[in-house]
Amino acid sequence: MKIIKVDEKTVPISSEISNAFIDFSKMTASIVAITTDVIRDGKPVIGYGFNSNGRYAPTGLLNDRFIPRLLEAKAQDIINDEENNLDPFKIHDILMQNEKPGGHGERSVAVGVLDMAIWDAVAKIESKPLYRLLSERYGDGQVDDKVFVYAAGGYYSPGKGLKELQDEMKNYLDLGYTHVKMKVGGAPLHEDLKRIEAVLEVVPSGQHLAVDVNGKFNLKEAIEFGEKIEDYNLFWYEEVGDPLDYRLQAVLSEHYPNPMATGENLFSFQDATNLIRYAGLNPKKDYLQFDCALSYGLVEYMKILDMLERNGWSSRRCIPHGGHQLSLNIAAGLKLGGNESYPGVFQPFGGFADNCAFEDGYVSLPSIPGIGFEAKENLYTELAKIGG
Ligand code: MG
């Protein structure tokens, strides 16, 4: 078997929303299609991938380095002969040839996009949903038949007041979500506290609301804000300071007693390891949000899961950032704690399969081969424009 071609396209996912650090007015994403010579149901198998929101399309990196490396590789260097299938681990090594350690930049995003497409193709070649393949090959063989997802929203946007914020959150609860998240840190403290209190009026309790600072606070601000929200007993306090400032996180953990979450902007196994070593996180109460689609893909994520286990962390403490179907498959197949979800934003990439049962904060997965993109019509319409 072989890869016939790799197509890439840069697409806009712009919107008027903003968090404490960036607005999304010029946001883009890369989509890729890896076309193989394997035929299933009368058609060549095509694996699709994209990068999740928050990082721009790594177009140059893909076209200048990573796609050529994949296409120039010898068949024996990317294929697993026993399974007569692509080998994501060998491909990871090919992609990372001649890349120095450290300084990950956004090459981790480019590799993540290709890794997603490879896993989609691998599962399609095996004629299985990816979550089942993951569970059988790398897990305990038992898949979770539904996955916890929470609604991430509460962005700042022009003209949005407390009433609109409450309506947004009520809408998430009406859709079947039990837990919601809102942005903080992008307004003065007293305004953010009013926004939090407005949302607390519409959710069942503080345990159903998480707040996300997107890395904005310095240590003093982080502690001060933490003191103000401590009594709300929130679901979690997210990415409070710079993602690489492990000391800030560690000192904050001596002040803030409730759950915290971070990790979406750590893009490598080594960064994740340093977080666990030095950031004072508590495996009994805190959450980890590494997003494989931004951080070298599932091959790297599996190394991170191994590292977590060695350090006494359950995979259930992982609730990845990104709201995409690859992490949903990993959650179901390798037993994570859940996945983020963005109802209504970052379309068509955010969200899960159409017509899948969604109830009490849990979503089920489609049973089609691959990651499940073909079961999400607006996404598949976009992806199907390339490849083939
Ligand atoms: Mg976040």
Image (cartoon, rainbow, N blue to C red):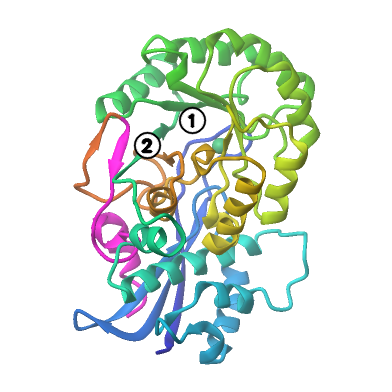
The answer to which of marks 2 and 1 sits earlier in the sequence is 2
Binning the other alpha carbons within 10 Å of mark 2 as few (below 14), some (14 to 19) or many (20 upward) gives many
Based on the displayed image, in which of its 4 quarters is residue 19 positioned? top right
Q: Amino acid at mark 2?
A: Phe
Q: Residue at x 57, y 89 (%)?
A: 72
Specify start and end residues of the magenta stretch as a single range: 361-388
Percent of width and height locating residue 155: 48, 30
Q: Nearer the viewer, mark 2 or mark 1?
A: 2
Q: Nearer the viewer, residue 77 or 315?
A: 315
Q: Residue at x 40, y 40 (%)?
A: 341
Q: Quadrant of the image for the N terminus? A: bottom left
Number of residue marks: 2
Instruction: Let me know if residue 187 is in the magenta part.
Output: no
Q: Quadrant of ligand 1?
A: top right
319 up-or-down from 200: above or below:
below
Binning the other alpha carbons within 10 Å of mark 1 as few (below 14), some (14 to 19) or many (20 upward) gives many
Q: Tag 2's secondary structure?
A: strand
Percent of width and height locating residue 62: 58, 72
Q: Amino acid at mark 1?
A: Tyr
Q: Which residue is mark 1?
A: 155
Judge whether residue 276 can be spotted in this image: yes
Q: Residue at x 40, y 33 (%)?
A: 150
111 up-or-down from 240: above or below:
below
Residue 148's disc is: 2
Instruction: Let me know if residue 376 is in the magenta part.
Output: yes
Q: Tag 1's secondary structure?
A: loop
Question: Could you give the CA–CA distance between mark 2 and mark 1, rounded to whole angstroms?
Answer: 22 Å
